[in-house]
Image (cartoon, rainbow, N blue to C red):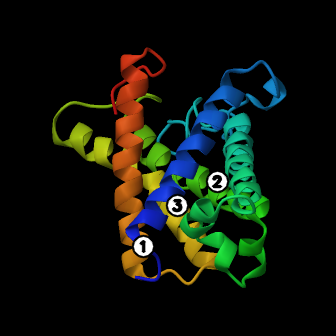
């Protein structure tokens, strides 16, 4: 591994902050012209939507914005805190995109949101409505996929610009999946999410 578990967990913490910013931006009555579905209602050969109503242009833009803010502000804090500097993997890199925390954040935020699209595509094919799930083993499978798809997207985006090993990617995806699940369950219990997980 090129990065410690603590550093990879810190990436997940920053992505959680990015996710909160993303949720706030989605709820605020701004950029509402971008609230349109990314698939524009496009119906495929199976007479089902490509992604569904929940994957919007506003969501596609707000997650990279949230991640840019989270990582960018963290980059500023690195100048004032040795602890934050030691936790932050991107401040030690020579790759150009990784030297700019704002751009790096936007890049992995984009990886996060794009990685959710295949999951939505498959769910529409097997008649799982946007924001819903199924019972049985199919539902349990998608419960796991829902937690790790975006983490895998972040890890792959990071691997494009950082020297990440396969183990780094796997550990980041696993930690991200656990963090994603804990946050999702917490949001469900406080009434900010419609389904648990």
* Secondary-structure class at tag 3: helix
Say if mark 1 contacts mark 2, CB within 8 Å. Answer: no
Q: In the drawing, does residue 135 fall left or right of residue 35? A: left
Q: Tag 1: Cα neighbours inside 10 Å, few (<14), some, or many (≥20)?
A: few
The residue at which mark 1 appears reads as: 4
- How much space separates mark 1 and mark 3, taking CA atoms? 19 Å
Q: In the drawing, does residue 137 fall left or right of residue 195? A: left
Residue drawn 35% across the image and 40% down it: 181
The picture quadrant where one finds residue 135 is top left
The residue at which mark 2 appears reads as: 109
* Secondary-structure class at tag 1: loop
Above or below, 114 relative to 16: below
Seen from the viewer's position, the closer of residues 76 and 38 is 76
* Secondary-structure class at tag 2: helix
Mark nearer the N terminus (1 vs 2):
1
Residue drawn 57% across the image and 31% down it: 54
């Amino acid at each position: 591994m090129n990065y410690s578990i603590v550093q990879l967990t810190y990436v997940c913490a920053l992505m959680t902050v990015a996710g909160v910013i993303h949720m706030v931006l989605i709820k605020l009555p701004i950029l509402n012209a971008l609230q349109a579905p990314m698939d524009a209602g496009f119906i495929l050969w199976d007479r089902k939507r490509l992604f569904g109503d929940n994957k919007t242009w506003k969501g596609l833009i707000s997650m990279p914005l949230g991640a840019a803010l989270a990582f960018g502000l963290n980059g500023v804090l690195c100048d004032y805190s040795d602890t934050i500097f030691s936790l932050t993997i991107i401040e030690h890199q020579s790759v150009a995109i990784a030297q700019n925390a704002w751009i790096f954040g936007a890049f992995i935020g984009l990886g996060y949101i794009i990685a959710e699209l295949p999951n939505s595509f498959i769910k529409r094919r097997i008649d799982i409505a946007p924001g819903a799930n199924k019972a049985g083993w199919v539902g349990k499978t998608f419960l796991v996929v829902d937690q790790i798809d975006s983490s895998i997207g972040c890890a792959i985006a990071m691997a494009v610009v950082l020297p990440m090993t396969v183990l780094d990617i796997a550990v980041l995806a696993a930690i991200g999946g656990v963090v994603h699940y804990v946050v999702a369950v917490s949001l469900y219990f406080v009434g900010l999410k419609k389904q648990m997980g």
